Image (cartoon, grey):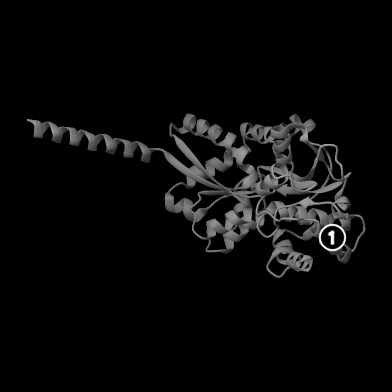
Amino acid sequence: MKVAANLRAIAFAWCFAFALVADARADATLLNASYDVAREFYKEYNPAFARYWKQKTGETVKINQSHDASSKQARSVADGLEADVVSMNQASDIDMLVERGGLIQPGWRKRLPYGAVPYISTSVFLVRKGNPKKIRDWDDLAKPGVAVIIPNPKTAGNGRYTYLAAWTYVVLKGGSEAQARDFVSALFKNVPVLDTGGRGATTTFAQRGIGDVLVTFENEVFLIKKELGDQFEIVYPSVSVIAENPVSVVDKWADKKGTRKLAHAYLEYLFSEEAQEIAARQNFRPQLPSVAKKHAGTFKKLALFSVDEQFGGWQKAQKIHFDDGGLFDQIYQAKK
Protein backbone atom coordinates (compact mmCIF):
# COMPACT_ATOMS: atom_id res chain seq x y z
CA MET A 1 0.00 0.00 0.00
CA LYS A 2 2.79 2.37 0.90
CA VAL A 3 4.56 1.63 -2.40
CA ALA A 4 1.33 2.22 -4.30
CA ALA A 5 0.81 5.52 -2.49
CA ASN A 6 4.34 6.59 -3.34
CA LEU A 7 3.80 5.70 -6.98
CA ARG A 8 0.59 7.71 -7.05
CA ALA A 9 2.43 10.67 -5.48
CA ILE A 10 5.20 10.42 -8.05
CA ALA A 11 2.68 10.17 -10.88
CA PHE A 12 0.82 13.22 -9.53
CA ALA A 13 4.09 15.15 -9.29
CA TRP A 14 4.96 14.32 -12.89
CA CYS A 15 1.48 15.33 -14.08
CA PHE A 16 1.77 18.62 -12.15
CA ALA A 17 5.20 19.32 -13.59
CA PHE A 18 3.93 18.54 -17.10
CA ALA A 19 1.03 20.93 -16.58
CA LEU A 20 3.44 23.68 -15.58
CA VAL A 21 5.55 23.07 -18.69
CA ALA A 22 2.43 23.05 -20.86
CA ASP A 23 1.26 26.33 -19.32
CA ALA A 24 4.72 27.84 -19.82
CA ARG A 25 4.70 26.78 -23.44
CA ALA A 26 1.26 28.31 -23.91
CA ASP A 27 2.67 31.75 -23.02
CA ALA A 28 4.15 33.35 -26.14
CA THR A 29 7.55 34.99 -25.65
CA LEU A 30 9.35 37.67 -27.61
CA LEU A 31 12.90 39.01 -27.32
CA ASN A 32 13.47 42.65 -28.22
CA ALA A 33 17.12 43.62 -28.77
CA SER A 34 17.19 47.35 -28.21
CA TYR A 35 19.55 50.26 -27.63
CA ASP A 36 20.43 51.20 -24.11
CA VAL A 37 18.57 54.47 -23.49
CA ALA A 38 15.23 52.98 -24.59
CA ARG A 39 14.95 50.95 -21.37
CA GLU A 40 12.36 53.16 -19.67
CA PHE A 41 10.17 53.38 -22.76
CA TYR A 42 9.95 49.61 -23.20
CA LYS A 43 9.50 49.11 -19.47
CA GLU A 44 6.23 51.01 -19.85
CA TYR A 45 5.32 49.87 -23.36
CA ASN A 46 5.69 46.11 -22.90
CA PRO A 47 2.94 45.72 -20.26
CA ALA A 48 0.67 47.95 -22.37
CA PHE A 49 1.16 45.73 -25.40
CA ALA A 50 0.68 42.57 -23.31
CA ARG A 51 -2.67 43.89 -22.08
CA TYR A 52 -3.72 44.78 -25.61
CA TRP A 53 -2.70 41.37 -26.96
CA LYS A 54 -4.45 39.52 -24.13
CA GLN A 55 -7.66 41.41 -24.78
CA LYS A 56 -7.44 40.88 -28.54
CA THR A 57 -6.40 37.22 -28.66
CA GLY A 58 -6.72 35.80 -25.14
CA GLU A 59 -3.03 34.90 -25.30
CA THR A 60 -0.55 35.83 -22.59
CA VAL A 61 2.69 37.23 -23.96
CA LYS A 62 5.99 37.80 -22.20
CA ILE A 63 8.47 40.27 -23.67
CA ASN A 64 12.12 39.96 -22.73
CA GLN A 65 14.46 42.90 -23.25
CA SER A 66 18.14 43.08 -24.16
CA HIS A 67 19.79 46.50 -24.00
CA ASP A 68 23.21 47.76 -25.05
CA ALA A 69 24.70 50.25 -27.49
CA SER A 70 22.74 50.07 -30.74
CA SER A 71 25.54 48.81 -32.98
CA LYS A 72 26.69 46.32 -30.34
CA GLN A 73 23.16 44.95 -30.26
CA ALA A 74 23.09 44.63 -34.04
CA ARG A 75 26.35 42.68 -33.97
CA SER A 76 25.00 40.44 -31.20
CA VAL A 77 21.97 39.57 -33.32
CA ALA A 78 24.21 38.99 -36.33
CA ASP A 79 26.37 36.69 -34.20
CA GLY A 80 23.45 34.56 -33.03
CA LEU A 81 21.31 36.40 -30.46
CA GLU A 82 17.88 35.10 -31.50
CA ALA A 83 15.90 38.32 -31.09
CA ASP A 84 12.42 38.32 -32.59
CA VAL A 85 12.55 42.09 -33.09
CA VAL A 86 15.14 44.85 -32.99
CA SER A 87 14.56 48.47 -31.97
CA MET A 88 17.63 50.53 -32.84
CA ASN A 89 18.57 54.19 -32.94
CA GLN A 90 19.72 54.31 -36.54
CA ALA A 91 18.75 52.56 -39.76
CA SER A 92 22.26 51.36 -40.60
CA ASP A 93 22.21 48.94 -37.65
CA ILE A 94 19.14 47.27 -39.16
CA ASP A 95 20.57 47.43 -42.68
CA MET A 96 23.60 45.55 -41.40
CA LEU A 97 21.29 42.67 -40.46
CA VAL A 98 19.93 42.71 -44.00
CA GLU A 99 23.43 42.38 -45.39
CA ARG A 100 24.74 39.80 -42.91
CA GLY A 101 23.16 36.41 -43.47
CA GLY A 102 19.79 37.75 -44.59
CA LEU A 103 18.55 38.02 -41.00
CA ILE A 104 16.16 40.78 -42.09
CA GLN A 105 14.65 40.98 -45.54
CA PRO A 106 15.15 44.09 -47.72
CA GLY A 107 12.27 46.52 -47.67
CA TRP A 108 11.87 46.38 -43.89
CA ARG A 109 11.11 50.12 -43.81
CA LYS A 110 7.96 49.60 -45.89
CA ARG A 111 6.39 47.12 -43.49
CA LEU A 112 5.39 49.73 -40.89
CA PRO A 113 4.21 53.37 -40.92
CA TYR A 114 6.59 56.34 -41.01
CA GLY A 115 9.40 54.29 -42.50
CA ALA A 116 9.27 51.94 -39.47
CA VAL A 117 10.24 54.82 -37.12
CA PRO A 118 7.66 55.07 -34.31
CA TYR A 119 9.22 58.10 -32.63
CA ILE A 120 12.26 60.37 -32.92
CA SER A 121 14.65 62.22 -30.65
CA THR A 122 17.51 64.68 -31.08
CA SER A 123 20.91 65.43 -29.55
CA VAL A 124 21.01 68.10 -26.82
CA PHE A 125 23.35 69.19 -24.02
CA LEU A 126 23.18 68.60 -20.29
CA VAL A 127 25.36 70.86 -18.15
CA ARG A 128 25.92 71.19 -14.44
CA LYS A 129 23.82 73.60 -12.38
CA GLY A 130 24.60 77.21 -13.20
CA ASN A 131 26.29 76.20 -16.47
CA PRO A 132 29.74 77.23 -15.15
CA LYS A 133 31.42 76.84 -18.57
CA LYS A 134 28.71 78.97 -20.27
CA ILE A 135 27.95 76.34 -22.90
CA ARG A 136 25.35 77.58 -25.40
CA ASP A 137 26.07 75.95 -28.74
CA TRP A 138 28.25 73.42 -30.54
CA ASP A 139 31.25 75.70 -30.88
CA ASP A 140 31.52 75.93 -27.09
CA LEU A 141 32.26 72.20 -26.94
CA ALA A 142 35.56 72.66 -28.77
CA LYS A 143 36.91 75.39 -26.49
CA PRO A 144 39.98 74.64 -24.39
CA GLY A 145 39.21 73.48 -20.88
CA VAL A 146 35.75 72.07 -21.63
CA ALA A 147 35.37 68.33 -20.92
CA VAL A 148 32.70 66.75 -23.13
CA ILE A 149 31.10 63.36 -22.49
CA ILE A 150 30.00 61.54 -25.67
CA PRO A 151 29.55 57.79 -26.23
CA ASN A 152 31.84 56.11 -28.72
CA PRO A 153 30.69 56.67 -32.34
CA LYS A 154 32.16 53.28 -33.25
CA THR A 155 29.72 51.42 -31.01
CA ALA A 156 26.86 53.83 -30.26
CA GLY A 157 24.41 55.48 -32.61
CA ASN A 158 24.12 58.14 -29.91
CA GLY A 159 27.77 59.06 -30.48
CA ARG A 160 27.40 59.02 -34.26
CA TYR A 161 24.48 61.44 -34.11
CA THR A 162 26.55 63.80 -31.96
CA TYR A 163 29.49 63.63 -34.39
CA LEU A 164 27.26 64.31 -37.40
CA ALA A 165 25.42 67.15 -35.65
CA ALA A 166 28.70 68.87 -34.78
CA TRP A 167 29.97 68.40 -38.35
CA THR A 168 26.77 69.81 -39.86
CA TYR A 169 26.78 72.78 -37.49
CA VAL A 170 29.94 74.01 -39.20
CA VAL A 171 28.69 73.30 -42.72
CA LEU A 172 25.36 75.09 -42.17
CA LYS A 173 27.27 78.17 -40.99
CA GLY A 174 29.05 78.20 -44.35
CA GLY A 175 32.15 76.26 -43.34
CA SER A 176 34.00 73.85 -45.60
CA GLU A 177 34.36 70.11 -45.14
CA ALA A 178 37.94 70.71 -44.00
CA GLN A 179 36.74 73.21 -41.39
CA ALA A 180 34.10 70.74 -40.22
CA ARG A 181 36.77 68.08 -39.80
CA ASP A 182 38.99 70.47 -37.84
CA PHE A 183 36.10 71.41 -35.58
CA VAL A 184 35.11 67.82 -34.85
CA SER A 185 38.78 67.02 -34.20
CA ALA A 186 38.96 69.83 -31.64
CA LEU A 187 35.73 68.63 -30.02
CA PHE A 188 36.95 65.06 -29.59
CA LYS A 189 40.20 66.29 -28.09
CA ASN A 190 37.95 67.47 -25.25
CA VAL A 191 36.42 64.02 -24.71
CA PRO A 192 38.19 62.36 -21.75
CA VAL A 193 36.52 58.95 -22.05
CA LEU A 194 34.46 57.13 -24.69
CA ASP A 195 31.80 54.89 -23.18
CA THR A 196 30.38 52.20 -25.44
CA GLY A 197 26.78 53.43 -25.12
CA GLY A 198 24.60 56.35 -24.13
CA ARG A 199 23.66 54.98 -20.72
CA GLY A 200 27.33 54.45 -19.88
CA ALA A 201 28.01 58.07 -20.84
CA THR A 202 25.18 59.14 -18.55
CA THR A 203 26.74 57.23 -15.66
CA THR A 204 30.14 58.81 -16.34
CA PHE A 205 28.70 62.33 -16.31
CA ALA A 206 25.91 62.18 -13.75
CA GLN A 207 27.17 59.63 -11.24
CA ARG A 208 30.95 59.69 -11.61
CA GLY A 209 31.01 63.47 -11.93
CA ILE A 210 33.27 63.53 -15.00
CA GLY A 211 32.91 66.26 -17.61
CA ASP A 212 31.34 69.69 -17.99
CA VAL A 213 28.70 68.73 -20.54
CA LEU A 214 26.98 65.53 -21.65
CA VAL A 215 25.76 65.32 -25.24
CA THR A 216 23.02 62.73 -25.54
CA PHE A 217 19.46 62.13 -26.68
CA GLU A 218 16.73 64.50 -25.51
CA ASN A 219 14.78 61.74 -23.73
CA GLU A 220 17.89 60.83 -21.72
CA VAL A 221 18.50 64.35 -20.43
CA PHE A 222 14.88 64.59 -19.30
CA LEU A 223 15.31 61.31 -17.43
CA ILE A 224 18.45 62.55 -15.69
CA LYS A 225 16.70 65.79 -14.70
CA LYS A 226 13.75 63.81 -13.35
CA GLU A 227 15.93 61.50 -11.27
CA LEU A 228 18.57 63.96 -10.08
CA GLY A 229 16.58 67.18 -9.86
CA ASP A 230 18.23 70.59 -10.01
CA GLN A 231 21.82 69.40 -10.24
CA PHE A 232 21.75 69.87 -14.02
CA GLU A 233 20.39 72.15 -16.73
CA ILE A 234 19.34 71.35 -20.30
CA VAL A 235 20.82 73.42 -23.13
CA TYR A 236 19.39 73.27 -26.64
CA PRO A 237 21.87 74.05 -29.42
CA SER A 238 20.89 76.23 -32.38
CA VAL A 239 20.74 73.23 -34.70
CA SER A 240 20.66 69.49 -34.16
CA VAL A 241 20.00 66.17 -35.84
CA ILE A 242 16.83 64.11 -36.17
CA ALA A 243 17.61 60.88 -34.33
CA GLU A 244 15.42 58.18 -35.81
CA ASN A 245 14.59 55.07 -33.81
CA PRO A 246 13.68 52.39 -36.39
CA VAL A 247 12.29 48.93 -35.64
CA SER A 248 12.02 45.64 -37.49
CA VAL A 249 11.07 42.01 -37.13
CA VAL A 250 14.18 39.81 -37.37
CA ASP A 251 12.78 37.58 -40.11
CA LYS A 252 15.17 34.66 -39.70
CA TRP A 253 14.66 34.23 -35.98
CA ALA A 254 10.94 35.05 -35.95
CA ASP A 255 10.30 32.46 -38.66
CA LYS A 256 12.46 29.89 -36.88
CA LYS A 257 10.58 30.42 -33.61
CA GLY A 258 7.12 30.80 -35.18
CA THR A 259 6.61 34.28 -33.73
CA ARG A 260 6.30 36.39 -36.90
CA LYS A 261 2.63 37.33 -36.43
CA LEU A 262 3.15 38.29 -32.79
CA ALA A 263 6.42 40.09 -33.50
CA HIS A 264 4.84 42.20 -36.25
CA ALA A 265 1.87 43.04 -34.02
CA TYR A 266 4.27 44.07 -31.23
CA LEU A 267 5.97 46.58 -33.53
CA GLU A 268 2.78 47.68 -35.25
CA TYR A 269 1.26 48.64 -31.89
CA LEU A 270 4.11 51.13 -31.40
CA PHE A 271 2.20 53.36 -33.82
CA SER A 272 -1.04 53.19 -31.84
CA GLU A 273 -2.29 56.19 -29.90
CA GLU A 274 -1.59 54.45 -26.58
CA ALA A 275 2.01 53.70 -27.50
CA GLN A 276 2.56 57.20 -28.91
CA GLU A 277 1.34 58.65 -25.62
CA ILE A 278 3.86 56.45 -23.81
CA ALA A 279 6.59 57.74 -26.14
CA ALA A 280 5.64 61.34 -25.31
CA ARG A 281 5.66 60.58 -21.56
CA GLN A 282 9.12 59.11 -21.97
CA ASN A 283 10.20 62.30 -23.77
CA PHE A 284 10.45 60.88 -27.26
CA ARG A 285 8.89 62.98 -30.02
CA PRO A 286 5.84 61.03 -31.27
CA GLN A 287 5.13 60.50 -34.96
CA LEU A 288 1.33 60.32 -34.83
CA PRO A 289 0.19 63.90 -35.67
CA SER A 290 -2.67 63.92 -33.15
CA VAL A 291 -0.36 62.94 -30.29
CA ALA A 292 2.48 65.19 -31.47
CA LYS A 293 0.09 68.17 -31.54
CA LYS A 294 -1.18 67.37 -28.04
CA HIS A 295 2.37 67.38 -26.64
CA ALA A 296 3.81 70.18 -28.78
CA GLY A 297 4.54 72.28 -25.71
CA THR A 298 6.74 69.56 -24.23
CA PHE A 299 9.34 69.65 -26.97
CA LYS A 300 11.28 72.78 -27.80
CA LYS A 301 11.25 73.82 -31.44
CA LEU A 302 14.71 73.98 -32.97
CA ALA A 303 16.29 73.65 -36.39
CA LEU A 304 16.60 69.95 -37.16
CA PHE A 305 18.24 68.19 -40.10
CA SER A 306 18.18 64.56 -41.17
CA VAL A 307 21.11 62.32 -41.97
CA ASP A 308 19.58 61.79 -45.42
CA GLU A 309 19.53 65.53 -46.09
CA GLN A 310 23.08 66.30 -45.03
CA PHE A 311 24.98 63.07 -45.62
CA GLY A 312 23.06 61.19 -48.29
CA GLY A 313 21.81 58.55 -45.88
CA TRP A 314 23.29 56.32 -43.21
CA GLN A 315 25.08 53.92 -45.54
CA LYS A 316 27.11 56.74 -47.05
CA ALA A 317 27.73 58.40 -43.68
CA GLN A 318 28.80 55.10 -42.15
CA LYS A 319 31.26 54.34 -44.92
CA ILE A 320 32.89 57.78 -44.94
CA HIS A 321 32.91 58.59 -41.26
CA PHE A 322 32.59 55.49 -39.07
CA ASP A 323 33.82 52.38 -40.88
CA ASP A 324 37.28 51.14 -39.89
CA GLY A 325 39.81 53.59 -41.26
CA GLY A 326 37.15 56.25 -41.80
CA LEU A 327 37.28 59.88 -40.79
CA PHE A 328 36.42 59.27 -37.15
CA ASP A 329 39.26 56.76 -36.80
CA GLN A 330 41.64 59.25 -38.40
CA ILE A 331 40.45 62.04 -36.11
CA TYR A 332 40.60 60.00 -32.92
CA GLN A 333 43.98 58.44 -33.69
CA ALA A 334 45.38 61.92 -34.29
CA LYS A 335 44.12 62.87 -30.81
CA LYS A 336 46.37 60.19 -29.31
| Quarter of the rendering containing residue 311 | bottom right
Q: Label 1's element?
A: helix
**Viewport quadrant of the C terminus:** bottom right
Residue at 70% x, 51% y: name it: 158
Q: Position of residue 108 (x, y in %)?
A: 60, 53
**Viewport quadrant of the N terminus:** top left
Please tell me which residue lies in front, 269 or 29. Answer: 29
Please tell me which residue lies in front, 292 or 65. Answer: 65
Q: Position of residue 127 (x, y in %)?
A: 80, 42
Count of number-bearing discs:
1
* Residue on which the image places disc 1: 186
In this view of the protein, can residue 104 be seen by the observer?
A: no
Say few, some or many: other residues with alpha carbon within 10 Å of mark 1 (under 14 / 14 to 19 / 20 or more): some
Q: Is residue 280 left or right of residue 6?
A: right
| Quarter of the rendering containing residue 294 | top right
Up/down of 199 relative to 80, above or below: above
